[in-house]
């Protein structure tokens, strides 16, 4: 089967490479000529473990190619995926569907055979209806169906998630769409991956509901962490204790500086706006968004406390280890590190930082932060060292070298990756989240 993937960003590139690895003939389409040129040269536009080798092997086999021409790219394709960005719209927080609708119109104008058009981008309820209308209005004579197929990829583990999914959700209104999508996912169907066929609007809502629920779990355990600090309990033990309940589960119960990234902030906001449009308030999600927004700067204030308080902190130096919103990605979107750094800078603190993958993207977002070549360069002469992102590289830092390099042996662990007794035994003042 030939598949066209319109959009070669995170979702489009990972999905296209994985479909090609399944044996499909995949063309990834993007209007950015420089991005396509770099992909032809084997240079990835994003950092995702294993993606470069996956793309290279499938390009070499002839199953994966790249082009800037949509008309050429979709020719002969049985399934055309729309995987373009849907950022939050300025002013009201709605998902900006400009790119989705532009692509839909261009597909309709260039459709040269019967095909299924698949919205892979995260889109609000009802978007598929509009995509269908736009394509029909182009006057195409070819048979087409519009299907919703949301992605559930975790950055840093996207290839494994695609090839071994918890579930595949397909929203379709007719047999044509259903049968083509069965063929698209046949390799996974043979591996007995669960495929859930629903109507299109339900599929669109499943994606938002899933992300909102996970964001709620993160926010819940963060509030429990604050309570643990007040009453003298240990949030990690609380997480284990409740996570053992099969109705709750252990995932997304790790206390920290709040959620960030490309999905949760944008999707929770878009869900709120959809609920508002349909006069169906989602009060829990409203609270989640509000609490998460305030938590990031609260973590900055936690660092200020470790520096001796607001007045004492001025003129001191803090070293941030980790800038991306999570490890194994270079994604800086809505990263807690941005708010933590800004809180410190506003208080007159000098900030240095190191991240294994995110510094190039972080530089323009954090112009007042000094980027360093390694953790110990960042720590040099620091009055406090702050672990913001739990990269594996930070899980076994040389505490003796840290103590010799830093100005003061103060460690603020916003990810709880160290054992308090061990760090304190090494002579550090230690502060973590939700633990004594």
Image: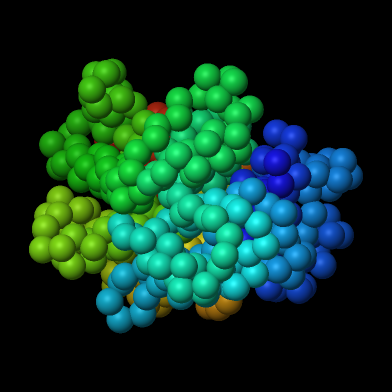
Q: Which quadrant holds residue 275?
A: bottom left
- Residue 127 lies, with reference to residue 186, above or below; the image says below
The spot of residue 133 in percent (x, y) is 41, 67
- Residue 109 lies, with reference to residue 111, above or below; the image says below
How many numbered marks, from 0 up? Answer: 0
Point out the residue furthest to the front here: 141
Residue occupying image coordinates x 56% and y 40%: 180
The spot of residue 198 in percent (x, y) is 35, 38
Of the pair 236 and 3, the residue shown nearer to us? 3
The spot of residue 332 in percent (x, y) is 52, 62
Residue 10 shows in this picture: no
Q: Is residue 374 left or right of residue 342?
A: right
- The quarter of the rendered structure image containing the C terminus is top left
Q: Which quadrant holds residue 302?
A: bottom left
Point out the residue furthest to the bottom here: 91
- The quarter of the rendered structure image containing the N terminus is top right
Q: Which quadrant holds residue 21?
A: top right
Q: Is residue 232 left or right of residue 255?
A: left
Residue occupying image coordinates x 27% and y 18%: 246
The spot of residue 385 in percent (x, y) is 49, 53
Residue 133 shows in this picture: yes
Q: Is residue 130 left or right of residue 39?
A: left
- Residue 8 lies, with reference to residue 239, above or below; the image says below
Point out the residue furthest to the right here: 60
Residue occupying image coordinates x 80% and y 44%: 63
- Residue 190 lies, with reference to residue 402, above or below; the image says above
Q: Is residue 144 left or right of residue 228?
A: right
Residue occupying image coordinates x 79% and y 54%: 65
- Tell me how the rendering is colored: rainbow
Of the pair 247 and 84, the residue shown nearer to us? 84
């Amino acid at each position: 089967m030939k598949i066209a993937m319109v959009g070669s960003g995170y979702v489009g590139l990972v999905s296209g490479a994985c479909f090609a690895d399944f044996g499909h003939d995949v063309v990834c389409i993007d209007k950015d000529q420089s991005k396509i040129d770099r992909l032809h040269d084997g240079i990835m536009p994003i950092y995702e473990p294993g993606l470069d080798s996956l793309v290279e092997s499938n390009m070499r086999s002839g199953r994966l190619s790249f082009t800037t021409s949509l008309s050429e790219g979709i020719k002969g394709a049985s399934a055309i995926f729309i995987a373009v960005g849907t950022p939050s719209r300025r002013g009201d927080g709605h998902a900006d569907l400009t790119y989705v609708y532009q692509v839909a119109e261009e597909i309709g104008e260039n459709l040269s055979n019967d095909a299924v058009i698949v919205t892979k981008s995260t889109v609000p309820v009802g978007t598929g209806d509009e995509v269908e209308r736009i394509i029909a209005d182009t006057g195409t004579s070819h048979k087409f169906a519009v299907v919703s197929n949301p992605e559930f990829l975790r950055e840093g583990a996207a290839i494994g998630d695609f090839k071994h999914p918890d579930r595949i959700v397909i929203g379709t209104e007719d047999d044509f769409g259903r049968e083509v999508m069965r063929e698209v996912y046949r390799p996974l169907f043979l591996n007995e991956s669960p495929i859930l066929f629903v109507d299109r609007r339900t599929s669109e809502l499943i994606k938002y509901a899933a992300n909102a629920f996970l964001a709620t779990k993160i926010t819940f355990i963060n509030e429990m962490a604050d309570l643990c600090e007040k009453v003298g309990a240990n949030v990690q033990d609380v997480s284990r204790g409740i996570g053992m309940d099969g109705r709750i589960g252990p995932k997304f119960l790790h206390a920290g500086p709040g959620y960030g990234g490309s999905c949760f902030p944008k999707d929770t906001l878009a869900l709120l706006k959809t609920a508002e449009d349909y006069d169906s308030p989602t009060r829990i999600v409203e609270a989640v968004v509000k609490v998460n927004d305030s938590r990031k700067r609260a973590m900055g204030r936690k660092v200020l406390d470790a520096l001796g308080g607001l007045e004492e902190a001025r003129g001191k130096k803090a070293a941030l280890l980790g800038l991306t919103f999570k490890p194994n990605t270079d994604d800086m979107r809505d990263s807690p590190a941005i708010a933590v750094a800004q809180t410190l800078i506003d208080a007159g603190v000098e900030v240095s930082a190191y991240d294994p993958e995110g510094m190039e993207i972080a530089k323009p977002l954090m112009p007042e932060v000094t980027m360093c070549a390694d953790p110990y360069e960042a720590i040099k002469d620091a009055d406090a060292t702050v672990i913001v992102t739990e990269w594996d590289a930070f899980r076994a830092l040389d505490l003796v070298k840290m103590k010799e390099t830093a100005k003061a042996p103060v460690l603020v662990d916003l990810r709880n990756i160290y054992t308090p007794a061990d760090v304190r035994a090494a002579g550090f003042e230690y502060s973590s989240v939700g633990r004594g």
